[in-house]
Amino acid sequence: MEFQTLRKSHKKQIIMGAIAICVIGGALTFATTRAKYKLTEEIEIAKGTINYKPYDFKIMAMYKSEDKTNYTEINDMPSEGYIINESKSYCNMSNGTKDTTAVLKTINGNHTIGKLKKNDKCYLYFDKQSTGSETILGNITVNSGTPNFVNAATTDEGVYKVSDGVYGGYSYYWRGAVTNNYVKFANKCWRIIRINGDGSIRLIYDGATCHANGTNTTESLTISRQTYNPNKNRAEYVGYTYTLGSQRTTGGTASNLKTQNETWYNSNLASYDSKIAEGKYCNDRNIGAGYSWSSQPPSTFGYAGYDRSGVKSASSVNPTLSCPSGDVYILKIGVITMDEIVMAGGKWRTANSSYYLYSGQNYWTMSPYGTSSTPVSSVFFVYTDGQLWAANADDTAVSVRPVINLKSDTFFVAGGTGTQSNPYVVS
């Protein structure tokens, strides 16, 4: 796209406005200041043209760095992925003194240059922008060791590192009454659950606005009072998808929870799809120790999550980020797991209104609990008082609170600190 070019003219023209240059999506917009023009020339900047008179505006040099230390001179202004280094960039006036009123910064992903004076000579330094996960990890201290999952987390315990059996590498997860995991994305507020092993960022929905810990709000829900599945009389109904007669499948019939969740996604997040990763979600249908699987079992059995959660033994709580390969779903949207609830500070049958996942509402996980000989199949969920509990798959009193994953190359707008009043903002 080219900008309209003022033609050579012997007739003077008066153009009113204020100098403001803003690169948006690789194009540069330009409004001129009050000046008289008899002759114009054109230069190419950012794949467009602007009009200028040689003594009116002079950008003398631009430099780019990948490590914020070593800079190389460049000919073209970089776009996404780089920000202007405000402390290093400067403009000098014709008398050689620094122009302290010049604006040289990147705002919401757009390079903005304004309030220049006649004959300013500017030197712009561009730094490679940190990805979202790099920005977050640069702002926090990661705890060593492993917390005691036997206890609910009612204070700010910070961030821990754990081996990520699904994504590989390590995952960093937030635990307790943390206040530095807020993200604004798609005009909605989210809380960070963890940074996955591949650098993508797992978020849980918090509502149209950001809520303080301990807030009772229905805004954290996208769909109220939905069954996990419409039936409970077979073991298969704990599946996020299921095929009758099969212990596990990632195909087959979609659960009601999956259908409702994806319908909401298509209505609310489809236009932001390019920034949302195909996340890996675990619907662990392994059987607990000492049990065997049956569609309509002669006796009650628990799933592996039953053993890990502390239901089987209150003194043995061992959440994991590993998952059977046949139970991993690749999806744009899902829900939280029992293991992630426990890592965040939730506990079986123990109220907790302090940790960041409390919202005063019932909402589903995608982790199977067990199947009784009746038969009745049950799934873990978060109760209104924040405790981990289990509900029948056809329970109509539990709601939907979605989870998504931002892509690993997602950038944040500069300046966010992850707090409720100053959340990380996706650029």
Image (cartoon, helix red, strand yellow):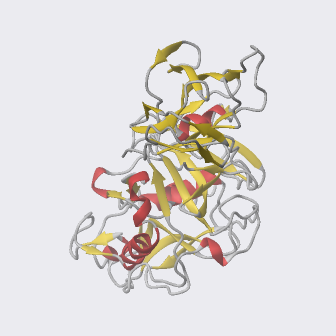
From what the image shows, is residue 88 above or below residue 234? above
- How far from the left and from the top, in percent, is residue 22? 56, 42
Res. 59 visible in picture? yes
- How far from the left and from the top, in percent, is residue 265? 42, 69
Near-viewer residue (33 or 212): 33
- How far from the left and from the top, in percent, is residue 307? 49, 57
Quarter-of-image position of residue 363: bottom right
From what the image shows, is residue 314 above or below residue 262? above
Near-viewer residue (50 or 89): 50
Classify residue 155 as left or right of residue 387: right
Quarter-of-image position of residue 408: top left
Q: Residue at x 58, y 74 (%)?
A: 221
Classify residue 390 as left or right of residue 103: left
Q: Residue at x 48, y 83 (%)?
A: 226
From what the image shows, is residue 59 above or below residue 107? above
Res. 309 visible in picture? no
Classify residue 324 as left or right of residue 116: left
Near-viewer residue (342 or 272): 272
Near-viewer residue (343 or 149): 343
- How far from the left and from the top, in percent, is residue 393? 43, 80
From what the image shows, is residue 369 above or below residue 135? below
Classify residue 62 as left or right of residue 157: left
